[in-house]
Amino acid sequence: NPAVADAHPDYPVEVALVGAGVEKSRLIPDTPDFVSLQTYRGAPGYGLNSDAVWSIPGARGDGVKFIDIEHGWWLNHEDLPDFFLEYHFDSPDAEYHGTAVLGEIVAQDNGYGMLGLAPNAEFGVIGTRYVSSAINGIVMAGEELDPGDVYILELHYYLSGDGYVPMEWFTSVRDAVYLNSLNGIICVEAAGNGNNNMDEFLPDFVRYTATDCQAIMVGAATPDGVTPFTF
């Protein structure tokens, strides 16, 4: 029963597969430039065509803040900028995953390592490992961000017997996201690594406009035929 699960403080969620000014840690003396390995930056079909998008003013993330909600991060990574928020509702975990997500977005344009899709954006992080704290994290993101800003719900939930589903499977998560949406704060939500048809795994009322929480749900698919990927 989702309503019962919403109230349970110990329903674990999983990631979908220090303060500002902290000293950065170089991994090796001369880190190579890895941009050529970031194939998702490339031309449409296999990539997002991000370099072409950068010709649009503001497309590098200027003037935008975002918050990543998941388990943990290595915030002293050499390729990350300073951050405006770090808060943990639960003990950190899976720091490698959160660091990779941040790198895809805000890795700095510095000639080494990766290059983020929006390197000029400001970022913050909220750590959570349970449904109840994920809801608290969504509410906090709404308090910390302004209209037009973005938060990433980089979590999914394991539904016994059915695999992973997006967090808005929980009514209270969906309500929290919807409240932020009404205030102009954008949620980008992982569809979950379950290879599931959302028409089957989300309650019927989620699929209709009246109760759409307005999150941008993102899944993975093959470039040809748009066949769902599973991880």
Image (tube, rainbow, N blue to C red):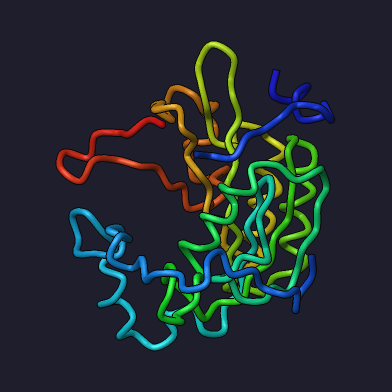
The structure residue drawn at horizontal position 58% and vertical position 35%, both measured from the top left corner, is 156
- In this rendering, does residue 107 appear at all? yes
Q: Is 231 or 152 nearer to us in this picture?
A: 231
Residue 207, placed above or below residue 87: above
Locate residue 54 relative to residue 171 in the image: left or right.
left
In the rendered image, which quarter is residue 169 located in?
top right
Closer to the camera, 149 or 61?
Answer: 61
Residues 122 and 2: in front is 122
Instruction: Locate residue 100, reporting x and y percent.
Output: 52, 55
What is the quadrant of the N terminus in the image? top right
Looking at the picture, how far across and down is residue 15, in whole percent?
59, 40
Quarter of the view holding residue 49: bottom left
**Residue 168 relative to residue 114: left or right:** right
In this rendering, the count of numbered labels is 0
In the image, residue 201 sits, relative to residue 186, either above or below, namely above
Whether residue 117 is visible here, answered yes or no, is no
Q: Position of residue 37 (x, y in %)?
A: 30, 60
Image coordinates of residue 150 in percent, x first then y, are 58, 65
What residue sits 23% from the left and 40% below the top? 222
Residue drawn 72% across the image and 75% down it: 23
- Can you say whether 228 is above or below 215 in the image? above
Left or right: where 198 falls relative to 182: left
Compared with 77, 164 (above or below) is above
Q: Quadrant of residue 99?
A: bottom right
